[in-house]
Image (cartoon, rainbow, N blue to C red):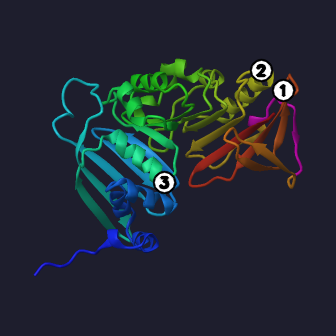
Amino acid sequence: MSTPSFPIFRLPTEATKFVIQCMEYIDIVGFSIVSSKTKEIVKSLNLEITRLNLSTEEILSIEVEGPSPMLWCFLPGGENAGPEPIPVYMPARVVAMHDDDNRRIMAQYKNPGLSIQEWLANFLYIFSWTEIWYLKFARETSKFDMSSLMETIGTATVNAFYFYDECGIECVRMALRQFPDTKIVFAYSRNLDDPSRYKDILIQNLDGLILGCRSALTRIGHDDILIINSKEIVVGSGIITDKIINRFLKHWKEGSNPRMERAIFLILDRQHHDRNAIFKGLNFHEAPFDQTRHFTHFSGEILEVVGGYDIRRVDGSVGTVIFEQGNNDVFGLTFYVWG
């Protein structure tokens, strides 16, 4: 005797919405591709997500961050071979995963004839989202043709590049050429640990350049820091010394890094610093410890800056040094430039 199916499509709209809200997000996404009507019903639920990322490795995958994080992997048929870079393929199967309370929920679909472009557009539509937060590259060279990737992304904006694992310099250059409107770069790849090999990227007019992380520390030198032309500079390193920071501040005072609005130095294996060495030869003013100022980040976020040490530039601009509390063997220093 067969079990009767639940007649969800015969329910009133509000009852349908109630049933859908009891489902897992991966099932809700699957429900949304059934028809135009189901897509509109899902969109009307105003489901919350915080980020949507597109990852390019051996296959393409969509990562959704939020209350119910998901990973959607698009598995190819036979189109994922041949000389690289290859065009973005038509998926044969789709696998969705969600980890919840130490258990993994999975759903597998035979692809219903949707291209990855259509899948991505569906995600953006039902979650009322307009951007890809991270476009992620992990291979030394991109497996996928950049023009084909751009066509797949369509009208969505790409907030930032995330280069990690073995991603190489040429992959970074190609991505920046293909997506010139993307102005934030996370360089977390082991193959990007020496910025002296890509000075052409350092001098670009970026909004943010983040160099190095705990698993791939940057080996940037003082001279290369001075040519960075980004509004925000973040350096994760184990070799930055108090003397290098001192020289950086002195050169900034004389006019280097003219576009910089904030610099963050995260130095591993150090919890202490020598303020005398950092401020040697610099005239500075210590702000009252309880003075609060508000810094406008290029993203529009307002940040509170409490206390600090002010340095005046030759053009009259003021920068403030903030020493961050050491955490897990990391010494932090942030330098704010006031507009």
Q: Quadrant of residue 143?
A: top left
Q: Is residue 47 visible?
A: no
Mark 3 and mark 2 in contact (Cβ < 8 Å)?
no
Q: Check contact, mark 1 vs mark 2: CB within 8 A.
A: yes
Name the N-terminal-most of marks 2 and 3. 3
Mark 1 or mark 3, earlier in chain: 3
Viewer-nearest of discs 2 and 3 = 3
Q: Which residue is tagged 2?
A: 255
Tell me where residue 245 appears, x and y as whole percent.
69, 32
Tell me how many marks there are.
3
Q: Which residue is mark 3?
A: 127
What are the residue bounds of the magenta stretch? 277-288
18 to 256, vertically: above or below: below
Amino acid at the residue labelled 1: Arg
Q: Is residue 331 left or right of residue 35?
A: right
Res 80 → quadrant? top left
Q: Amino acid at mark 3?
A: Phe
Residue plotted at (27% across, 60% down): 107
> In this image, 333 relative to 85: left or right?
right
Packing grade of label 2 (10 A; few <14, some 14-19, many >=20) is some
Tag on residue 241? Answer: none
- 10 Å neighbourhood of mark 1: few (<14), some, or many (≥20)? some
Q: Is residue 5 visible?
A: yes
Distance of label 1 from label 2 (alpha carbons): 7 Å
Magenta segment includes 285: yes
SS for dot 2: loop
